[in-house]
Image (tube, rainbow, N blue to C red):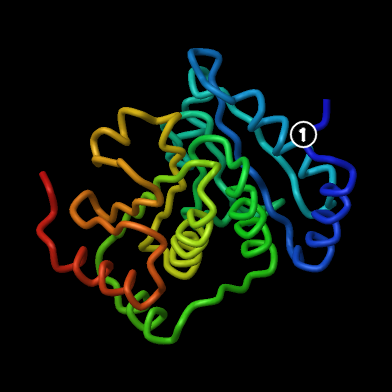
Amino acid sequence: MALLSPEDAKAVAAQFEENLQRPVKLVVATSQLNCMYCDEVKALSEELAELSPNLTVESYDLDVDVTDLAIYNLDKTPAIAIVADGRDEPDTDYGIRFYGIPSGYEFMSLLDAINTVGSDHVHLRQDTLDFLNDLDQDLHIQVFITPTCPHCPRAVILAHHLAYASPRVTADMVEAMEFQELSNRYNVYGVPRTVINETVHQEGAAPEPMLLQKLRQAVAAPTLA
């Protein structure tokens, strides 16, 4: 049974036709061991790939394909990494990750990530780009969401754009209910909640200048052992 309605599939195909100017690959990690929504994430990715010749899927089992998934540093499931497909060359990994099913409002974030990588274009302020160009350390951004949160996609999309713009940044969408242990670790009581390098937190869908200040704070903060 298709997850996308015919009307939605037609609209998404039109988006892909306009935006995917180069090949994009969805690297999907699943597991047969206690994985909520793994089958749905794989099925959704495959449905999307049917809508454009510039979109493909590679699926791996976390419990079997350890070497393959180590390349993408995918360590929990379900997961999707959005990469530029090198075809005959190595893929270009921008550190854009989805952990948990990107359903509900978060489907917008998944489409934006695919379109961003496929169009090789990102929307960020110049002061943000200057900060990213000067980064001399890595930043790991985790955005905790739920599919019913209308404000969450804005936080996820901004984080993913930061990752796309800098090889020093990785950005994860994390579905809070599917990854309760992580939610408890970071005291996620409301969404979106953005965690930067374990040390800095931002509540709500902060505008870009406010998040930039949080990034600066994370760079200045001592690293946790």
Residue 209 image point, x, y percent: 35, 78
In the picture, measured across the screen, residue 30 lies left or right of residue 182, that is right
Toward the viewer: 147 or 60? 147
Residue 148 image point, x, y percent: 54, 43
Mark 1 — residue? 3
In the picture, measured across the screen, residue 200 lies left or right of residue 102, that is left
Toward the viewer: 91 or 76? 76
In the picture, measured across the screen, residue 56 lies left or right of residue 86, that is right
Q: Secondary structure at mark 1?
A: loop
Residue 158 image point, x, y percent: 47, 65
Occupied quadrant, residue 81: top right
In the figure, 103 relative to 36: above or below?
below
- Residue name at image x 44 percent, y 61 percent: 159
Occupied quadrant, residue 163: bottom left
In the figure, 198 relative to 118: above or below?
above
In the figure, 117 relative to 124: above or below?
above
Mark 1, other Cα within 10 Å: few <14 / some 14–19 / many ≥20: few
Quarter holding the C terminus? top left
Occupied quadrant, residue 222: bottom left
Count of all numbered marks drawn on residues in the image: 1
Q: Residue furthest bottom?
A: 126
Residue 132 image point, x, y percent: 36, 74
Toward the viewer: 74 or 188? 188
- Residue name at image x 67 percent, y 48 percent: 25
Quarter holding the N terminus? top right
Amino acid found under the numbered disc labelled 1:
Leu
